[in-house]
Amino acid sequence: MDFPLIARRAGVVAGVAVACAYAWVAIQGPQGLPALLEKHREIRTLEEQNAALAHEVEMREERIKRLQSSPSEQEMEIRKNLKLLRPGETTFILPDPPKTDQPKESEPKP
């Protein structure tokens, strides 16, 4: 065979091998397909968190509007936060029920 033909084929094979190696590194490397999939997962998670926070903001805005428009709502919130009573009202503080580790009588015994 002719030396230039062999050199040309070897050059083409080497070029294809280099191109394949570059493609492999580009796909599997630090900026490759796994990183792209992780970024998509992170974006999805952040979008869900953003939606939850937007809902929370909406609920708080509604609560603020209720407090601004309703004096009775304002009074109830103030009394709850400051633990205030009206004249003649009595607060009852009840103890917590005792905790028992025994099963209830309605449960079958083994």
Image (cartoon, rainbow, N blue to C red):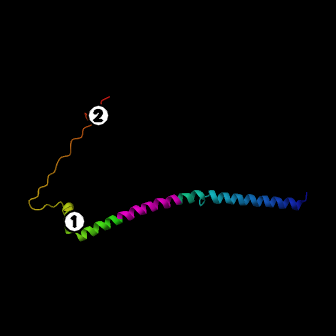
Horizontal side of residue 95 vs 108, given as left or right: left
Q: Is residue 3 above or below residue 68?
A: above
Residue linked to disc 1: 73
Picture residue at 44% right of the left edge, 60% below the top: 48
Q: Is residue 67 magenta?
A: no
Residue linked to disc 2: 107
Using the numbered discs, state the Cα–Cα distance from disc 2 to disc 1 in whole angstroms: 44 Å
Q: Please identify the quarter of the rendering in which residue 106 is found.
A: top left
Range shown magenta: 40-56
Q: Quadrant of the N terminus?
A: bottom right
Q: Of the residues shown, which amino acid type is indicated by label 2?
A: Glu
Neighbour tally class for label 1: few under 14, some 14-19, many 20 plus, Cα within 10 Å: some
The answer to whether marks 2 and 1 mark residues whose Cβ atoms lie closer than 8 Å is no
x, y (%) of residue 96?
20, 46
Task: Decide which of 24, 67 is in the foreground and name it.
Answer: 67
Residue that extends furthest to the top in the rendered view of this protein: 110
Q: Of the residues shown, which amino acid type is indicated by label 1?
A: Glu
Horizontal side of residue 28 vs 16, given as left or right: left
At mark 1, the secondary structure is helix
Residue that extends furthest to the bottom in the rendered view of this protein: 69
Picture residue at 83% right of the left edge, 59% below the top: 9
